[in-house]
Amino acid sequence: MADTGSDSCAPAALAAGAPQPLGEFDRIARYFRPLAQGFPGACGLRDDAAYVGVSPGQELVVTTDAMVAGVHFFPDDAPGLVAGKLLRTNLSDLAAKGARPLAYSLVTSLPRTLDEDWLAGFASGLAADQAEFGIHLLGGDSTVTDGPITLMISALGLIEAGTAIHRQGAGAGDLVFVTGTIGDAGLGLALARQRKGPVPEDDRQFLLDRFYRPRPRLSVGAVLRAGATASADVSDGLLADLGHIARESGLTAVVEGARLPLSPPARRMMEAHACTLVDLATGGEDYEVVFTVPPAARPAVLTAAAKAKLSITEIGVMRPLASGASRSDGTGPARLVDALGQDITPRAAGWQHF
């Protein structure tokens, strides 16, 4: 996740002289209970726990992501956008494991003086994305804080038993694929920070939308099941997240910069020297899925992607570590090469939390 670089973590929606805010249970009833409708195990958010049934032949996939104002989003961002991004980042993790969304729990830690309009907008954003992605709220917790708005979701998904895809399954010679386009969200963040020069308005809106409204690639599940050996969602940057696969698999990933899938706005910014291939490969928050495929499975994977109407691009290959090689030079387990095969890997492959 990228740092917004905000100088202040104080929420923008503080209401001076506002009426006494609702208590915890009134907030739950007004804003969050409607989000649990349609999921019987949530018990209408009236119990201390929820109940999740899993049919024979299925397994549960669980993921958790947190967001903090001033770190993962700007304090004055629209609450509906914050809610959608929080949910979608978790759905992206489920997508990378080939899972179908089921339900999620939500933890909020909010300033006591946060106004009701913020809560209403946040709940509305969750409701819209629940309807779009077929998922329900099943429970959670809420607290108050003197610090920044802090939010966390744990999302549950389902896969067929025995079909789990991990980071560590890649083999030497496997091909590297990625969904969608790379680098748009990082450029959108730079625009939100006003760190880029004049950009055509259509391009600006496209890139900001990619930053604020990631598209979890839930249709990738059928593609992964067609032959993928390892997968990860691209949250910290393509090189960083592909590097996780390479490290866990004991390999090195080599990415050809010329093959990176770029959107027209990103390509225009690169042609205008507003960004580089390295920027696009390390920007983070793309929420695409990067995965590895044995050469023999390539036709089946391409067929599955076409059937799912999902754009995927072959961008590189997994290589064995050179004999006696180490990664103490800091270059990381994923390498980016230019059209001449020259290594242009940056020392920092993407966003780092610590």
Image: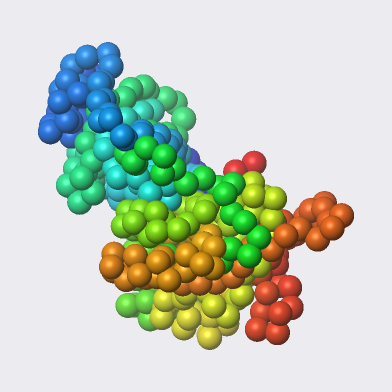
Height in image: 26 above or below 349? above
Q: Nearer the viewer, residue 98 or 108?
A: 98
Height in image: 17 above or below 347? above
Q: Residue furthest front?
A: 296
Query: In the image, what residue occupies the spot 52% across and 52% down?
Result: 230
Q: Nearer the viewer, residue 50 or 19?
A: 50
332 sits left or right of 181 in the view: right
Q: Position of residue 282 (x, y in %)?
A: 58, 62
Q: Position of residue 333 (x, y in %)?
A: 70, 56
Query: In the image, what residue occupies the spot 64% across and 49% down?
Result: 249
Whether residue 304 is visible, yes or no, is yes
Whether residue 69 is visible, yes or no, is no
Height in image: 142 above or below 165? above
Q: Position of residue 94 (x, y in %)?
A: 38, 45
Within the image, what quadrant is residue 263 found in?
Answer: bottom left
Query: In the image, what residue occupies the spot 33% across and 22% down?
Result: 141
Instruction: Tell me how many marks there are.
Output: 0
Q: Nearer the viewer, residue 198 or 94?
A: 94
235 sits left or right of 316 in the view: left
